Structures are given as structure tokens and as C-alpha cells.
């Protein structure tokens, strides 16, 4: 039975949700079940209280995202009425003359937590893996089942902001500290405690009245128009625009609803306003894109859609890391946080200890912020063993080499340490550009050799690009994938072509921006316009961060290795300009204070020397500049898909957002094409190719999909 209904001898009704499918969700079946159950509750004789709980591992998973991403502009009114229908039943539940308790046995996210908020009392089972919160904003949506208004009234504007504007999800214990739940108990005590609570508050009118229904109730922290909150709201609005460039409407709409709810309108009007804003958000392209990639695509990728099939899951028991520099120390931290014993080796013990000190610094920050205890920090640190002795690596089932990006250096490290692997161990090379097949030539077991491209800083960047060399076995790829999930990274598996997927693709948009400057466009305008596409930073600023010298050195190394032919370079003026800046003007990047910008303690200013390239009479339209930068990366992604460098559309979309700064509102570089319209995208590519060169020619995979009117999935 979808909603099991049981009334005990004390007059307490327990509703146990067990809807069809893996989770309880606010799908088309929910509202009739909810309404019918409420009809029955309202007619009960001798009713003393109601408990809502779940028969599944999760309490309730939220809204039906398949339904939401299919909403068209014509369906907005129907969605609004549906949401209002659900909220009307919630209000009936809130106004029952008996206490209603949410017995939260597992994760309660989105609509699931909104259901909890409509209960008088919330008790969560103690489980650090359970999450409670309203993450809708991370999918381009807003909490539309009453959550935006109720949480604002419950916590106040400031305290509610992290949960509503950032989509913060917390464990039951942290939910208790934040005021999201009233109690946390052992799982086997959950229902008993819920019943005990109901019995204890019989006759207590406050226990059956929601705060917002108490006459004279004041929202914590005061109304939105108060002298404290008004400037705070204005500041947050400005911050949101800076972060989203106005391309993700969800956060701004949430703040708007919060502002209205906190003192401008009554509770029920605020609820209706929330429903209207929610329904109008659903059909927007940015919403569909974010749902498609950040939920469905992410689930496909993390679920192993590209992982070789029929290979048992595995776990790394002991990890060796060679090189305690920026990458090695970050990998050590991530592995230790996942409970993996790590041997961190460098040329000297001092260097290895310095690598461990990086983890100590990060962990101590967590302790200072109350995110872990000192004992927990010490337990994680104890997992990292710094050393300068090769024999200490012996027996590790995975060794990751994270040394300087040169084949001769990596080969020397491989030769010295490969025999120290456990009998069934595998070797990972952390590289962003060097070919794995070439590196594996020095291995005695190339089938156990795999590329592991981590992103910097490793502790913050969620992506891991796994590179399959020509001889890398499926078992090794599967084990690398499992290791990525073990350390809570999102893995994509890519083919071993120059630059793999991420380095190859991020390079195209950076070089296109440099090409525009080399052609005479204003560098500040180019940088700002690239940022206004929704990318996290401007392309020239990004190049300064990455370091011009590094890009130049990688390119010259690739030429020397025969991996690229300068005659085939799509943006030769950009390559020439970078070479001149590095070798002729000693402008190596931000680390030296000199790149496209001059850097000082006071900030940054564009280098005046760039005026030598400027052509004042040649000003391109804003859209052309933005499209040239964005389309280069998109077309390169499609070529990677066509060539088999990418194994799936989901890998391309997720990888582009998590690894190379694709604007979140696009849903990734391939999803952008779906929303733009394939035929329209081909036409625009043809226009750009005619005007700016054949690097904008649509690849066959794009023309074929457009001709068949097939989206990329």
C-alpha cells in the first residue's frame, strides 16, 4: 500500500509512505494519496495525533524532476494549480487540532523536507549519511511546496539564506543545531519517541499551532524592511547577480519571495506568491538544463554509465603517492578524508612532511568552523605517513605519481617504484596533457597503467578525469572509477588523445579570447564579455591564473613530441602572441605578477603594453565575441564525442561544468546545443566559420543530429 494507515489504541495515526518506485516523491500519484489520507484523518474519532514516516531508506526525495523538466510555457498554469492543490492539503494538515509529527527516518530533501515543515514537530533518526535541506536552487528551481516561506518564517531571513539561496544540505545532528528539526534520536527509537511526544503534549494548544499561525508571531531577526535587514537584502541581491550574471534566475526569485514573506504580506499570500514564482521558473531553458545535467546527468556519471560493466566493485586499501607538491598533497588529503591509509613520498622527508602539513592546515580549519572535532582531525592525519624512502610504498594497491609534468621525470619515478606495487595493484599517473599510452611504454604492466587527471585545488575540485591508454584494461578503468567514487570525486572516463577532454577543450576558449586580442579587440572588453556568458572568470584572467608560461611550455613540448603540428593550429595569432608575451616581455602569469594584467597589492590593471595589438577602428559585435569563445569549447566537445574521446553526452556535460568552467545555466557544453536548437546552432556555426575561419565548421556528428532533429542524450 502506497500510504499505509494505522491507528493505535492511543488514537495516534501513523502514515507510512511507501510509494511505487525506489523513493517517495511528489509525483502525479502523491497529491491524490495525500488528499485521501487527510480526508480520512479529519474524520477520525478520538484522534490524538498523526505521525508521518517512510518505509523506504529515505524519508522523501522531493519533486518529480522528470515532470518538471517537461513543463512547457503552456503548462505553467496547470503546474501552479497542482502546487497550490498540494499546499492546500498541507495547510489542512497544519490546522488539525492534534499534533502532527514528522518521523524522519532518512534523507528529507526538497519536497520531502517541505512536508516536514508542514508538521508541528520534526524528529530525525540519527544517521550522519542522511541529509536534510532544500537543494532546489542547485537545480535551477526554488522550494515551491511552501519551503521558501516556511523556512523564512521559522528561522528568519539571515539564518534561512544558506539553506534557500545555496541549497545547503546537512546531517540530522547539524539540522538540529540549525533549527531545522526539534530532536535527533536513535533509529530504533524514532516511532516510539514520536508517539511519546504526542502523548506528552495532549491539551497543549501551542503544540498544535504552527508558529506562523500564532497571533502576533514575529519572524526571528525582524522583517525585511528593518534597518538591519534592508541593507543585508540589497547586499545579497548584488552578490547573487555577481555570481549568476542574471543567467540563473532561481536565487534572485528565492530572495524576492523571502523578502515578501518576511513582513510585506501575510503567510497565505506569501505561499501563493511562492507557487506563482515556482511555476513560472519551471519552463525556463536554464532550469531544464540544470535538471538534465546536474541531476540526471550527474546520476548517470556517478552511477557508472561509462564504467566497464561486469567487473566487481573494488576499494583501495592502501594508497601510495609520489610527490608531495600541490597535487600530491591534495590527493593525500582527499584519500585520508575517505579513510584510506596514505604513504606520501617525496625526495626529502621535509618535503613529504610539508605535504602532510597541508592536510593539517585544512583539517584544523574544519575544526575551527565546528565541522569536525579535534579527535576526528587527528584520526585523519594519522592515516598520512610522510616518507622519503621508496620501500615504505611497498604493498600499496594503488600508486599515484604526481611529479613534474615531464615524461623523463615520470618515467624515472615509474622505473624506481613500479615493482613496489601490491601483486594486483595498479598505477595512476596524474597528468593534464601527457599521453598515457606513451607514459605506459615504460611500464612492465601497461594494462594496469591509467591516467588520473586531478584538478587543482584537489580538495575543492570535484572532477577526476580518468584516461584510458591503448593498453589500459577494463578492470583497471573500473578500479580507477571505484577509487574516484571512494574519495568522493565525480569520474569521467576519456580517451587518450592530446589534451584528453578537459585540457583540450578549455584551451580552445582561452586561445579564442587571446586570438580576439591579437586581432586588435579591446582586452578588457573581451575578458568581461567572456565572463558575462556565465563562465566563472574572464578568459584572459583565467589564462593569467593558469600561467601563460605553462601554456606556452606545454605547446612547445607537444610540438617536440610530435603530438601537434603548428601548421594545423586553429588560432596561430594567439599562439604567437602568448609566445611573445612570455619570451619577449617576461609576462609569465599571475604568479609572477605579470600576465595580461599587472598584479599588485591594490588589485589588477590591464597591461598597457597590450595597446600595441589594439585596432581602435575594428570593433566586433558583443555577440560575436561571446559566441566565438563559447562555440569553440562547444564544438571541441562535440568533436571529442565524435572521436570517442568522450564516452557519453553526460560525461561531456558534467565534465565541462565541474572541470572547465562551462556556465552552469547551460547544463554543460552539449546540453547548450539542445536548448539553443540544433539547426539554429548549425546555422550560427556556418556564419561564424564564413566570417572567422573553419575552426567553427560544425562536425559531422552535429550536422547529422540536426538533420535528423535528434537532441544529444
Image (cartoon, helix red, strand yellow):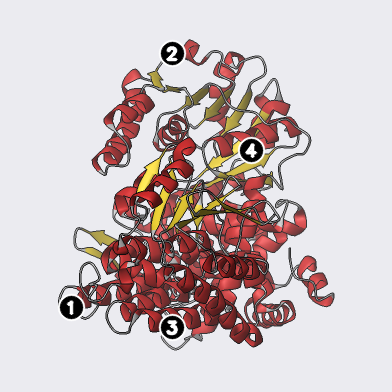
Residue topped by disc 4:
481
User: For the residues marked 4 and 3, what is the alpha-carbon distance in whole angstroms?
Assistant: 45 Å
Residue topped by disc 2:
389
Residue topped by disc 1:
226
User: Which of 227/242 is in front?
Assistant: 227
Q: Position of residue 66 (x, y in %)?
A: 67, 66
Can you say whether 454 is above or below 569 in the image? above
First in sequence, mark 1 or 4: give its number.
Answer: 1
Circles 4 and 3, Cβ within 8 Å, touching? The answer is no
Which residue in the rendered view is the most extreme toward the right? 708
User: For the residues marked 1 and 4, what is the alpha-carbon distance in whole angstroms?
Assistant: 52 Å
Q: Position of residue 50 (x, y in %)?
A: 48, 57
User: For the residues marked 1 and 3, what is the alpha-carbon distance in whole angstroms?
Assistant: 21 Å
Circles 3 and 2, Cβ within 8 Å, touching? The answer is no
Q: Position of residue 341 (x, y in %)?
A: 47, 22
Name the disc covering residue 183, or none.
none
Say which of marks 3 and 2 sits in front: 3
Which residue in the rendered view is the most extreme toward the top? 391
First in sequence, mark 1 or 3: give its number.
Answer: 1
First in sequence, mark 3 or 2: give its number.
Answer: 3
Circles 1 and 3, Cβ within 8 Å, touching? The answer is no
SS state under label 4: helix
Which residue in the rendered view is the most extreme toward the left? 227
Can you say whether 364 is above or below 542 in the image? above
Name the disc covering residue 273, or none.
3
Amino acid at each position: 500500500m502506497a500510504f499505509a494507515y494505522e491507528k493505535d489504541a492511543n488514537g495516534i495515526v501513523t502514515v507510512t509512505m511507501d510509494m511505487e518506485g525506489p523513493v517517495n516523491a511528489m509525483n502525479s500519484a502523491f497529491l491524490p494519496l495525500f488528499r485521501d489520507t487527510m480526508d480520512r484523518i479529519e474524520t477520525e474519532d478520538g484522534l490524538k495525533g498523526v505521525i508521518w514516516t517512510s518505509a523506504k531508506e529515505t524519508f522523501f526525495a522531493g519533486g518529480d524532476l522528470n515532470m518538471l523538466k517537461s513543463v512547457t510555457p503552456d503548462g505553467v498554469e496547470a503546474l501552479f494549480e497542482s502546487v497550490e492543490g498540494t499546499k492546500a492539503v498541507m495547510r489542512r494538515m497544519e490546522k488539525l487540532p492534534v499534533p502532527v509529527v514528522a518521523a524522519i527516518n532518512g534523507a528529507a530533501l526538497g519536497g520531502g523536507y517541505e512536508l516536514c515543515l508542514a508538521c508541528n514537530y520534526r524528529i530525525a533518526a540519527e544517521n550522519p549519511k542522511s541529509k536534510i535541506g532544500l537543494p532546489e536552487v542547485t537545480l535551477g528551481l526554488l522550494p515551491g511546496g511552501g519551503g521558501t516561506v516556511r523556512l523564512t518564517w521559522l528561522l528568519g531571513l539571515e539564518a534561512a539564506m544558506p539553506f534557500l539561496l545555496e541549497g545547503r544540505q546537512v546531517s540530522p545532528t547539524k539540522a538540529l543545531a540549525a533549527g531545522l528539526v526539534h530532536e535527533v534520536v536513535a533509529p530504533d527509537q524514532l516511532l516510539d519517541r514520536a508517539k511519546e511526544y504526542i502523548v506528552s503534549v495532549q491539551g497543549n494548544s501551542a503544540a498544535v499551532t504552527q508558529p506562523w499561525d500564532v497571533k502576533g508571531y514575529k519572524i526571528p531577526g525582524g522583517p525585511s524592511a528593518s534597518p538591519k535587514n534592508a541593507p543585508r537584502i540589497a547586499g545579497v541581491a548584488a552578490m547573487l547577480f555577481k555570481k549568476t550574471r542574471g543567467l540563473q534566475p532561481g536565487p534572485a526569485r528565492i530572495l524576492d519571495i523571502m523578502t515578501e514573506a518576511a513582513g510585506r504580506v501575510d503567510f497565505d499570500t506569501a505561499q501563493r506568491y511562492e507557487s506563482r514564482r515556482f511555476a513560472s521558473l519551471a519552463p525556463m531553458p536554464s532550469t531544464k538544463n540544470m535538471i538534465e545535467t546536474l541531476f540526471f546527468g550527474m546520476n548517470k556519471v556517478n552511477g557508472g554509465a561509462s564504467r566497464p560493466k561486469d567487473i566487481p566493485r573494488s576499494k583501495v586499501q592502501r594508497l601510495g603517492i609520489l610527490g608531495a607538491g600541490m597535487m600530491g598533497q591534495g590527493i593525500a588529503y582527499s584519500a585520508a578524508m575517505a579513510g584510506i591509509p596514505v604513504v606520501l613520498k617525496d625526495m626529502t622527508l621535509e618535503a613529504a612532511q610539508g605535504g602532510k602539513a597541508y592536510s593539517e592546515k585544512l583539517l584544523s580549519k574544519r575544526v575551527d568552523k565546528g565541522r569536525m572535532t579535534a579527535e576526528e582531525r587527528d584520526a585523519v592525519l594519522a592515516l598520512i605517513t610522510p616518507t622519503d624512502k621508496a620501500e615504505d610504498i611497498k604493498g600499496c594497491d594503488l600508486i599515484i605519481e604526481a611529479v613534474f609534468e615531464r615524461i623523463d621525470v615520470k618515467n624515472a619515478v615509474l622505473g624506481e617504484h613500479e615493482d613496489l606495487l601490491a601483486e594486483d595493484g595498479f598505477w595512476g599517473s596524474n597528468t593534464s596533457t601527457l599521453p598515457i599510452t606513451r607514459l605506459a611504454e615504460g611500464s612492465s604492466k601497461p594494462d594496469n597503467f591509467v591516467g588520473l587527471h586531478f584538478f587543482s585545488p584537489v580538495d575543492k575540485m570535484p572532477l577526476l578525469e580518468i584516461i584510458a591508454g591503448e593498453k589500459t584494461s577494463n578492470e583497471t578503468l573500473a578500479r580507477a572509477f571505484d577509487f574516484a567514487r571512494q574519495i568522493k570525486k565525480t569520474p569521467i572516463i576519456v580517451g587518450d588523445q592530446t589534451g584528453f577532454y578537459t585540457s583540450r577543450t578549455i584551451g580552445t576558449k582561452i586561445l579564442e579570447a587571446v586570438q580576439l586580442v591579437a586581432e586588435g579587440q579591446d582586452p578588457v572588453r573581451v575578458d568581461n564579455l567572456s565572463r558575462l556568458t556565465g563562465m566563472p572568470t574572464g578568459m584572459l584572467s583565467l589564462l593569467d591564473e593558469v600561467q601563460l608560461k605553462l601554456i606556452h611550455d606545454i605547446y612547445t613540448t607537444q610540438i617536440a613530441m610530435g603530438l601537434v603540428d603548428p601548421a594545423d593550429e586553429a588560432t596561430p595569432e594567439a599562439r604567437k602572441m602568448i609566445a611573445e608575451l612570455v619570451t619577449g616581455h617576461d609576462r609569465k602569469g599571475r604568479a609572477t605578477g605579470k600576465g595580461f594584467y599587472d598584479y599588485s597589492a591594490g588589485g589588477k590593471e590591464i597591461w598597457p603594453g597590450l595597446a600595441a595589438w589594439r585596432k581602435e577602428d575594428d570593433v566586433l559585435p558583443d555577440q560575436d565575441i561571446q559566441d566565438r569563445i563559447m562555440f569553440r569549447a562547444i564544438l571541441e566537445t562535440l568533436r571529442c564525442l565524435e572521436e570517442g574521446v568522450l564516452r557519453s553526452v553526460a560525461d561531456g556535460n558534467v565534465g565541462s561544468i565541474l572541470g572547465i568552467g562551462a556556465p552552469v545555466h547551460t547544463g554543460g557544453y552539449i546540453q547548450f546545443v539542445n536548448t539553443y536548437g540544433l539547426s539554429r546552432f548549425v546555422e550560427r556555426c556556418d556564419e561564424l566559420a564564413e566570417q572567422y575561419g573553419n575552426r567553427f565548421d560544425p562536425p559531422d556528428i552535429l550536422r547529422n543530429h540536426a538533420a535528423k532533429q535528434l537532441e544529444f542524450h
